[in-house]
Image: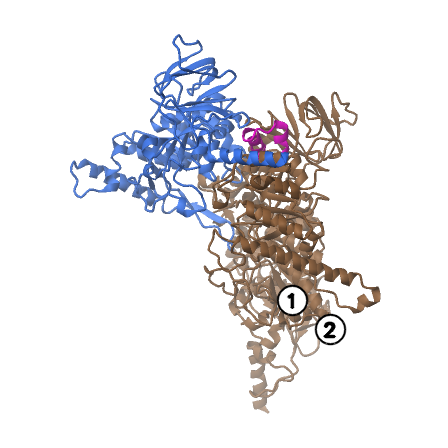
Amino acid sequence: MKFENNFSKHLVTLLMLIPLFVFSQKEYFPTNSGVKVVNEPYKAFVNATIVVNSEKTIENGTIIFRDGKIINVGKGIKMPKNTIIIDQKDKFIYPSFIETTSSMSIKEAKRLAYSTRSAMYGPTREGFYWNDHILSDYKAYLDYKYDSSKAKELRASGFGVVNTHRSNGIHSGTGILLALSDSSNENQRVLSNNSTEFYSFNRNALSNQSYPTSIMGSMALIRQFFHDLEWYSAGQAKNKDYAIETAIKNKAMPKIWNSGSNLNFLRALKISKELDIPFAVVGSGLEYMDLNAVLKYKNKLIIPVNFPAAYDVSDPDLTKKISLGSLREWNQAPSNLYILEKNNIQFSVTSSGLKKKSELLPNIRKAIRRGLSTKSALEALTVNPALILKIKGVTGELTKGSYANFLVTSKPIFDENSEIYENWVIGVKHVVKKEIKPTSKNKQVVNDTVKKADKKIKAIDFVPVTFPNKAYGNKTVPQSENMIIRNATVWTNEAEGILQNTDVAVSNGVIVAIGQNLQNNNNSREIDGTNKHLTSGVIDEHSHIAASSINESGHNSSAEVTIADVINPNDISIYRTLSGGVTTIQILHGSANPIGGQSAIVKLKWGETAENMLMKDAAKFIKFALGENVKQSNWSSYSRFPQSRMGVEQVYVDFFQRAKEYGEQWDKYNSLPKRTKSKTPKPRYDIEMEVVWEILRGERHISCHSYVQSEINMLMKVAESFGIKINTFTHILEGYKVATKMAKHGAGGSSFSDWWAYKYEVIDAIPYNGPILTEAGVTVAYNSDNAEMIRRLNQEAAKAVKYGGLSEEEAWKYVTLNPAKLLRIDDKVGSIAPGKHADLVIWSHNPLSIYAVAEKTIIEGAIFYDYMKLDEKIKHNEKEREIIITQLKEAKKSGAKTQPAPVIDKRYFECETIDIVNENVQ
Amino acid sequence: MFLAVHSQQVPGKKQSKSTLISYGTIHLGNGDLLENAFVGFDEGKITYVSTEPPDINYEIIIDARNKHIYPGFIALNTSLGLGEIDAVRATIDDDEIGDFLPHVRSIIAYNAESKVVETMRMNGVLISQIAPNGGIISGSSSVVQLDAWNWEDAVIRYDQGIHLNWPSPYSRTGYSYYRGPSIIKKSDKYDLNVEEIKNFFDSSKAYLNEPNPNPVSLPYKAMAPVFNGNATIFLHADDAKQIKDGVRFLQDQKIKNIVVVGGTNSLGAGDFLADNNIKIALEQPHNLPSMEDEDVKSRFRLASQLINKGVTVAVDATGEMTRMNTRNLPFFAGSFAAYGVEKEKAVESITLNAAKVLGIEDNYGSIEVGKSATLFVSHGDALDMRTNNLSHAYIDGRSVSLETNQTKLWQRYKKKVEEEKSN
C-alpha cells in the first residue's frame, strides 16, 4: 500500500495548495478527473483574539471551520481529531467586511452618444414598462464576470462579501451577492444571483427616452411605477409588462437607493417614507449637515467615507475662488460618522465613491480619530450591512454556521498600524500581506513604519457646522422673538394706509399690535425704527431660486412633478434675496410644457430644512405655459406636440377632458356600495390625472406663463368651457391688450415691470402693462423670474409709479399684498395687520426709492437677515477661511495629496432653463 | 406729460430758437450742483449757466421750478442698435467671427431707428458708445447720440475705441451633469494667449512703420489710431490680475489711452488703477456676485470702494438683456449712490466721467458754457425710478421726442380700457 499512501500524501499537499479543486466539488457534481474527495478535514485557528462581533471578543480563542462554514467558536472548545491546527498567537480574527453597494464585476452601461436630433419620447423596448429608465427586469447577473483584480483590491481592504450591481436607471434592477474567493467556482462564489433591488435618480444610460429630464421627474416616475405595480397586481392591465411582473416578484427583496448627493439623499428618504418601502439609502458622506432632516427617518443608511482630498491652496488668487462650503467639507466630512453615531443613527459604511479601496481603512481610522467608536466602525462594516442584505447569521459575524469569512490581523483592526495579513473567504485563505516577523535585522524598519504612521495621527480642529453649512450660514436657525419696532413709517397695505411714527408689536411670529407708544409687557426686544420705513415682506409670485431642478421637459404635460420635491434650502440665492427684503416666494416649475409641474410656496427661512421652508396651509398651484417655450421654437426640436399655438389649445382640452373622465371614473368607483366596491377593480391611479383633476375641482390653481393676447384669450376660453378660472397669468406682457377680458374672467396678472425685447413674443411688451391692468380691475403683481432682480423687487414696484403714474401706496402692493392675493395667502401675509405673519422689513428709505436698503428682513418674528451684521458675517467667513486654509497647508506639508479647487457653479434657473437628471447637482 | 414736439422716430430739428430753462436744480455732471439756477442754449451750444437770471432774452423759456436738469446720460459699452430681439438671430449684429478684428466697425451696423434705442431717451440716456462683442479684439466702437435718422447723423465720434478682451488666467473644466461641479485651475494657455496678443500688437506696429505697405493689411492698418493716440483701448477684464497684466502690457506697448471695462472683481487692482491714472467703466451693479462667498452687496459697493481709492469710475451698461436694460442706466448709478457714492458723484459717473472715457468731454458730459446743449429736465431725482420723469430732452440743442412705440401702445390701450370701462 505504499503507493496509495504516497498518493494520499500528495493529495493532501495538493489540496492545501489548490483549494479550488476541493471546493469546486459539490456533492451532486460528477467527477471525471479522479476519485471524488469527501470528508474534508477541519481547520482551526488557535491562540487568537477572536472578535466574534462588536459585542463579543474571545481572548485566546479557537475557531473551527470546515467546508466554508464556521463549525464552532470559543475558548478551549473540543476539536475533532481530523483538524488542521493553525496557531494564530498574537493575531486578531475579525469577520470579513460586507460591501452593500458595489459595481465590481458587472459590465458598465455605456452611455449612448447624446442625440442632437429631436428628443425621443417613446420607449425603445417592447413588452416592458412605458419608460426605459425603469429597468426593474434587469439582472446584473447577466452582465457578470468575476473580476479577480477588483476582488483582490476589495479583499485587501477587508471585504469578504460584496453586493454588486449595475448602477443604471431609476430602477436599476437587481444585483448579485458575491463572495470574494478567487479559488472557488461560481457555484460557491455567487451567493445569490438576485440579491437586492437597486434604485437611483439617474436615467438609463442606454436610452435617450426624454422623460424624465429632472430629479423631480425621476421622483414622480418612481411613485407612479409603484402605483402601477399595485394596479397591475390586481390583474387589471390588458397587456403584459415584464418590468412590472419582475418588480412584483421582487417585492420582498431588500432595496437599496443610490442617492448621490446630500439633498438627493433626503429626497430618497422622503420617497421611501411616502411609499412605505424601507429602502436602505446610500448617502453622500455629508449627512452631518442635514441632521435635523435625517433624524426624522428610520431607514437603514449606507454611508461612504470618500472624504474630500485636501485642496491645492498654493495660489492665493485661485484659493479665493474655493467656497467656504467646500473648505468646510474637507474639514468636517471625516467627522460625519462620529456625528451620526453620537445622534444614535445606525449606518453601514460603503467603500463606493473611494478612488482606491485601500483608502477605506485609513479613512475609517480618521473617523475614529474624530470620535467614532471602534464598535460602531466594526458594526458598520459587518453586521449592519448584513442586516441590510438580510444575511445576518450567514456572514458578518464569527458565529456557528456562518461562512468562514474572516480577517487575520496583526493588531486590533482599527489601530493605526494594524495590518491585514489574511482574508479568508468561504474557508479559503487569501494572503493580503505577508507577515514580517520582527527579527533583529528588520526590527528597525518595522519601528520606522510604526513611527511614520503615528506621525500622521494629528487630528485637525473641526470648524462648527452652520445652517446652512456655507458662507453666511447661521450658527443656529433664527427663532421667533417678541419684538416692538418703534416710531417707523409703517406701510400697512390696509385701509389705514401709510402711518407715520408708528409702533408694530410682534409676538409668537405674528403681528399683535399697531399703534403709537405701544406697551412692552412681555419683555419684547425693542427695535428703533426712527426715520425708517417698515413694510410687510416682499412676495415674489414667480421665482426659480432655491430649487435643484426647475423644468421637467420630458413630456408636454408634467403635472405629476412637484417643486416641493426639489427645494434646495442651501441655495445662496436665498440669502441674497433676503437682502432685498423678500420673505415669501412661489417657486414655479419652468415653462417647457403647456402643463408644467406643481409649485411650492416657501418662506425664505435661511438655515431651515426644505420641509420647514414650505409655507404651512398655503394654497396649491400649478404652472402652465404658452407660446414660444412650449412650442419649442427657440431650440431645434420638431418632434413634440405642440409646435404651434394652435396645438397648445388642444393639449389643454385633451388633458382637461381626460381628467374629467378620470375623475368621473373614480367618483363612480368611490360611490359604490361597500360590498360591490370590494369586488370591483380600482381604476388605475394616475398622479398626473389626479393633479389635473384637482384643477377641475378648484383645489389647485393655475399660474400660466403667457405673453401674447391671442393665447391669453384662448386659455381663458378653454378654462371657462371646463367651468374653471385661470388664477394668474404670469409674465402676461400683452395683458394690457386684453385687460378687460382678464378682469371679466377674474384672472390676476403677475408681470415684469419693464422687461421686453428678449424674444419675439415680447415685442409689444410695455412697462405700462401693470397700471393698465390695474385700471381694468385686474389684481397685478410684479415678479422676478430671476435670481438677480428678485433682490430689487422694491425698485421694480417703483417703476409702476414711473411708468403709468400709479400712486406709491398702490405700487408697493404690486410686490406685497397683490402677489399674496394672487397666491391666495393674503389672509396670512401681504400687509401689516394684527394676526398676520410677522414677515416684516425695515428699510433705510422709502422702500420704492433707489436709495432704500433693506436693513432687517424678518420672517414670522425671526430675523433672517440683518444688513448691520453683514460685514461681521463677511469677516467671520474670512477668518474661518484662513483657519481652514492654514490647516490645508499643514496637511500638504505632512504629505496629504491635494486636488485643484472645485468651483461651485451657481446655475441660475429661469423659466427656460432645461435641466437633466444629475446625481451630483443639488 | 409728453410734449408732442415730434412724433416717435422723427428726430428733433436743428435748434432755431434760443432756449432758457429757469429756476431748476442743475446737476452739472462734474460733481457740482446749482440750485434755483438757469441754463440757456442757442444754436446747439450752452450759452449760459448761473444761479442769476440772464440779462438777455431767450425765445423759449421753460419753467423748471422744483425740477432737475442733467447733462444727457451716457451709456458705455452697449450694443444698442446692433440687436433688436435677443432670441431672434436674424436681428443680432453685435459679434463677428475671428480673433483680431480691429478693422470691424460697429457704427455701420448701428440701427438708429431701433425701437429699443428710442426707449433710452425717455429715461435721460441720450448718448451711447456702440461696441462690438466677441473675439480677442472685437472691433471698433463709435459714439452716437440717440436721436437720428441714420448712423451718419447719429455719430459723435467715429471709431474712438478698440475693444480688447483680456484672456482669463484661469481655466475651468466645464460644468458636467455627470461629473458635477467644475474644477478651476491656472490656465496653461494664459501665457500663450498673452503672447498672441503681443504678437498682434508688435506686428501691427512694425507694419505701420512702413509708410507705403504693399499689400495692405486691414487688421494692422486699423491699429494705427491706437498707437497714435486717436483711439482708446477698452480693456475688458474682470479680475484684479487680468487688469494689472493687461494694463502693464498696454503700457509696455506705449498705448496712451486705456480704459478698463467690466472690473467686476477689480477691488484688488483699485490702488493700481489710481496710481496709473486708469479710468474704469465699471460693470453696472444689477448683476450677481460671481462667487458664492462674495459679499452679497459687493457689486453695489464696488463703485464707492474704487472712488475712495481715487479711481475715476464710469458705468458699463453690461448685464442681462443688456440692450433693453440700458434704459435703466440712471438707476445703476442710483444703486451705486445707495451704497456709498455721493449723489453728484453718481451723476458724474454717467455723465462727465463717461464723456472722459470716450474722449468727448470737451463737448459733452457736463452743463458748461460752450459745450453741446445735450441735457434734459426731469420732474425729480433722475437716478431714482420713483422720480425719474422727463419733461424735456435736448441733444445738441435739438428738442427730442420722448415718445416711443411703447408710449404709443400705452396711450392706445389705456384709452381702450377707459372706454370699455365706461361702457
Amino acid at pointer 2: Lys
Amino acid at pointer 1: Thr
Report in which chain the residue with disc 2 lies: A
> Which residue was labeled with disc 1?
A196
Question: Is disc 1 placed on a helix, strand or loop?
Answer: loop
> Which residue was labeled with disc 2?
A78
Left or right: residue A76 versus residue B184 is right
Looking at the rendered image, the disc whose residue lies closer to the viewer, 2 or 1, is 1
Left or right: residue A716 versus residue A760 is right
Q: Main secondary structure of the magenta part?
A: helix
Find residue A510 and report its horizontal and vertical position in percent: 74, 34
Disc 1 packing (10 Å; few <14; some 14–19; many ≥20): many
Disc 2 packing (10 Å; few <14; some 14–19; many ≥20): few
**Image quadrant assignment for residue A461:** top right
Which hue belongs to chain A?
A: brown
Range drawn in magenta: A791-814
Quadrant of the image containing the C terminus of chain B: top right
Tag 2 and tag 1 share a subunit? yes
Which is nearer the eye, A461 or A297? A297
Magenta-span inclusion, residue B342: no
Magenta-span inclusion, residue A800: yes
Which hue belongs to chain B?
A: blue
